[in-house]
């Protein structure tokens, strides 16, 4: 596999540090990039009135060159040239040196959202009744953070110190998107700081869960649409006076703690309401921390260790089960009473009853916790 060198990376570098640029400058580059505009999605979103779930449409995304083609034999993945290693990149906005190679942030060539206008972008919330009756303008920016320029490095096998650097830069991007002056109007205020729009951070690993590239990365959306899960997190906080992270820490028994870091400062837990085997939650003991950029360096280091342990455990156990490795990391950040990260391995298929809202799991939370502990103790 061709390694992405610093020289090739610098050929696409428009800025080496997001803290030295404005959101308006980023949008300007989006609009000047003809290749990016060619792959722009549709300008609207539809909402399912039954659930409040949003659907974004993009004809261009079906033409993505990816590493997970449809296979005749699922167990024999084909080898293709990695476009990242080959230097097929969009503009690079942030770069940081690791113990080996670099981590960097660039624009998604096949964005799920796009800043079609430089004027004001209306905030869309599924709580608004009119959303059920009309199309909604979908606007924002879509970035990627590549864990390393080395193709075979990912969270499960990187040094924890390198994962920490990844998280530091991800926190900078999160703060940049939410607090910089932009066409995105204010969604809420936190500690006297105005926050603009909503940020969604996910990691898709494996084709079964939407991972179209093997080269390890995070996806980051800054959108004018309030994600349904964020709305539910906020509704829970309003209803109960505490967020999901706090409820989890209160209701979970000690037997459901997979691992505690820093004397419990960061926790890796099996939720008492686990829907699928090996699902986990990583959360901060301090539920006043709602964003990555609010975490201290010490907390980010503990989070890096937790993510390393979780992903390494998933990959080990899925290999033991003879399953193709696949998992999602879903970051819940916002005014929700404590940030948390869902660890979602693909270990059991979704059936009809799950679509109806009733889940069956072939492991109990206690058994799932013991499975993680066993792997970690032996690893």
Image (spheres, rainbow, N blue to C red):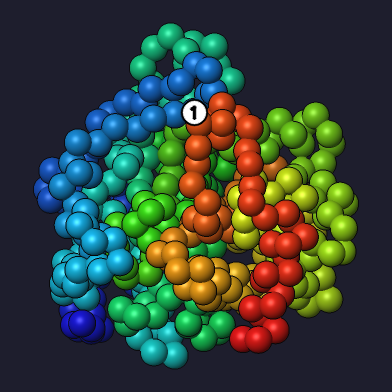
Whole-percent x, y for residue 315 in the image:
50, 72
Whole-percent x, y for residue 234 in the image:
69, 35
259 lies left or right of 34: right
Q: Residue 298's image quarter?
A: bottom right
Classify 43 as above or below 19. above
* Number of numbered labels in the structure image: 1
Q: Residue 238's image quarter?
A: top right
Viewer-nearest residue: 13 or 151: 151
Crowding at label 1, few (<14), some or many (≥20) Cα neighbours within 10 Å? some
- Quarter of the image that includes the C terminus: bottom right
Classify 65 as above or below 50. below
Viewer-nearest residue: 150 or 328: 328
Viewer-nearest residue: 26 or 329: 329
301 lies left or right of 179: right
Residue tagged by mark 1? 53
- Residue found 36% across the figure and 17% down from its top: 135
Whole-percent x, y for residue 177 in the image:
46, 50
Q: Secondary structure at mark 1?
A: loop
Whole-percent x, y for residue 12 in the image:
20, 69
- Residue found 60% across the figure and 70% down from its top: 310
- Residue found 56% across the figure and 26% down from its top: 356
- Residue found 25% across the figure and 31% down from its top: 42
Q: Is residue 353 visible?
A: yes
Q: Is residue 18 visible?
A: no
25 lies left or right of 269: left
- Quarter of the image that includes the N terminus: bottom left
Viewer-nearest residue: 8 or 62: 62
Q: Residue 236's image quarter?
A: top right
């Amino acid at each position: 596999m061709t390694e992405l060198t610093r020289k090739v990376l610098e050929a696409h570098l428009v800025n080496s540090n997001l803290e030295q640029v404005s959101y308006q400058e980023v949008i300007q580059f989006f609009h000047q990039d003809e290749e990016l505009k060619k792959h722009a999605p549709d300008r609207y979103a539809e909402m399912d009135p039954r659930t409040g779930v949003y659907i974004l449409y993009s004809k261009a995304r079906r033409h993505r060159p990816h590493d997970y083609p449809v296979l005749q034999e699922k167990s024999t993945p084909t080898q293709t040239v990695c476009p990242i290693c080959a230097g097929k990149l969009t503009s690079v906005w942030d770069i940081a040196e690791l113990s080996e190679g670099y981590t960097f942030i660039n624009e998604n060539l096949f964005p799920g959202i796009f800043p079609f206008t430089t004027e004001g972008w209306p905030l869309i919330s599924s709580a608004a009744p009119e959303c059920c009756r009309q199309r909604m303008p979908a606007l924002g920016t879509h970035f990627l953070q590549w864990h390393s320029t080395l193709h075979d490095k990912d969270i499960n096998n990187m040094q924890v110190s390198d994962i920490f650097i990844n998280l530091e830069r991800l926190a900078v991007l999160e703060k940049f998107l939410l607090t910089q002056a932009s066409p995105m109007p204010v969604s809420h205020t936190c500690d006297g700081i105005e926050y603009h729009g909503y940020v969604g951070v996910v990691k898709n690993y494996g084709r079964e869960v939407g991972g179209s590239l093997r080269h390890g990365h995070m996806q980051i959306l800054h959108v004018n649409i309030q994600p349904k899960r964020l709305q539910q997190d906020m509704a829970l906080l309003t209803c109960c006076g505490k967020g999901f992270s706090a409820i989890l820490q209160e209701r979970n028994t000690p037997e459901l703690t997979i691992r505690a870091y820093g004397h419990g400062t960061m926790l890796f837990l099996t939720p008492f309401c686990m829907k699928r085997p090996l699902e986990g939650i990583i959360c901060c003991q301090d539920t006043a921390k709602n964003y990555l950029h609010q975490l201290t360096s010490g907390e980010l280091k503990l989070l890096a260790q937790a993510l390393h342990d979780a992903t390494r455990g998933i990959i080990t156990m899925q290999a033991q089960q003879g399953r193709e490795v696949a998992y999602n990391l879903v970051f819940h950040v916002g005014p929700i009473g404590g940030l948390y990260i869902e660890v979602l391995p693909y270990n059991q298929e979704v059936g009809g009853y799950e679509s109806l809202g009733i889940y069956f799991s072939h492991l109990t939370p206690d058994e799932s916790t013991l499975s993680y502990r066993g792997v970690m103790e032996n690893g």
